[in-house]
Image (cartoon, rainbow, N blue to C red):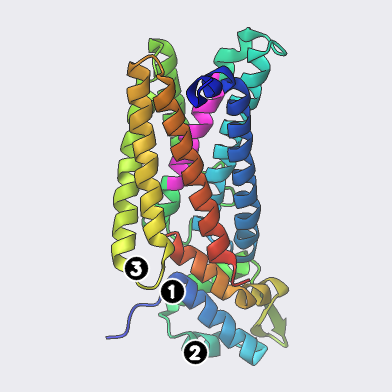
Amino acid sequence: MDSLTFLVENREIIKLFYGLLIGLICFVIVSRVDKLFRLSLHQGIRYFRNAFVFYGIAFIVRYVFGYLIYFSYISWDYFNAVTLIFKYFLIMAGFFLLYSLIWKKIENQKENYRSSLLNPRIVIFYAMSFLIIFLDYFWKTHHFIFISQIILFTITSGISLSNFVRGKKSHKFLKFYFIIMILSLMAWILNSIAALFEWNPIIIMTVSGINVITFLLFLYGVFGATRLR
Amino acid sequence: MAKKRERLEVIRDILKVIQNSRSIKPTRLLYASNLSPQMFKDYVDELLNKKFVKSEENEGKKTFSLTKKGQDFLMEYKVIENFVDNFGL
């Protein structure tokens, strides 16, 4: 049995471990970043933390519940709901990541919202996420999430490139941040290509591999930036 | 020309002035912080809201002093600054 056959035959258990691994990485990032936020009350740190709360929930819901549904521990009737929740949290996480990079240009000091989950700016993201998953659901497609994420990661790639060019000498992780954004963009482009080829397993595995690398790079960055502690 | 101070640097500078004086009058803090009166008010309001600083009144005179939260912020400032700069936040 070659390795591809092995992976395809055991894909459900591999997907479960993949979801749990990304969920665990997100949990570690959130707990580390949350400590910094509580100390500084810095809004950028807050939105960055929220991005990983949403990524963590998205991956755990999709892959743990997906596993339970696949092996009939839970009814297949819930599969659509799981997919919708996964998409919603994934889109919101992307918005939080983008907003953590641009909040300084948008919010002024006086706004200083008590909640980073429910404030007038974030409500716009909730509405946009809802619209995207509604359109996907209505047209029975994934085009809208793919297009939205490709646009979003193109913008974050541009911002992180500009941050890298301005601060490359003193802040080494800015280079990795830019690489992570490019990898995420590649993952979403490949994901949309996979959808055109009936979810080709090789492309999907490549996307999963890229995702694991991006989350590990984020983890590396968080540990690196907080090790002065 | 001197580089414009980043928000976090301004907060650190204000907190350091308060820490060094233990308790300081608003006018002295305004001079030491090197900010315009309006900017100073915004920053002090923010620091009071975040409970980094507390305001006390003794015999009709208002003073500012550092809270435990403000002291913790100063101790971990380098880590916070490093994180914010490395992630472009």
Q: Amino acid at mark 2?
A: Ala
Magenta segment boundaries in residue numbering: A83-97
Subunit that carries the residue with mark 1: B
Residue linked to disc 3: A167
Badge 3 crowding class, 10 Å Cα cut-off, few under 14, some 14 to 19, many 20 or more, is some
Spatial separation of the CA atoms under disc 3 and disc 2: 29 Å
Q: Looking at the image, which is closer to me, A99 or B15?
A: A99
- Of tags 3 and 2, the one toward the viewer is 3
A150 and A193: which one is in front?
A: A193
The reply, left or right, for residue A99 in relation to residue B52 is left
Q: Is residue A167 left or right of residue B78?
A: left
Report the residue at 35% width, 39% height from top: A185
Instruction: Answer few, some or many: residues within 10 Å of disc 1's Cα (few below 14, many 20 plus, some between 14 and 19).
Output: few
Residue beneath the point at 49% across and 33% down: A90
Residue A92: x and y in percent read 49, 36
Residue A79 vertical placement versus B18 (above, below): above
Q: Would you name the residue on which mark 1 appears?
A: B39
Whether residue B41 is visible here, answered yes or no, is no
**Few, some or many C-alpha atoms within 10 Å of disc 2 (few <14, some 14-19, many ≥20)?**
few
Locate the C terminus of chain A by quadrant: bottom right
Kindly identify which chain the residue marked by label 2 belongs to: B
Identify the image quadrant of residue B87: bottom left
Q: Position of residue A152 (x, y in %)?
A: 35, 39
Give how far across and how far down residue A25 sits, in percent: 60, 45
Closer to the chain start, of discs 2 and 1, is 2
| CA gap, disc 2 and disc 1 | 13 Å
Q: Quadrant of residue A62?
A: top right
Name the residue beneath numbered marker 2.
Answer: B32
Amino acid at the residue labelled 1: Met
Which amino acid lies under the numbered mark 3 shown in the image of this protein? Gly
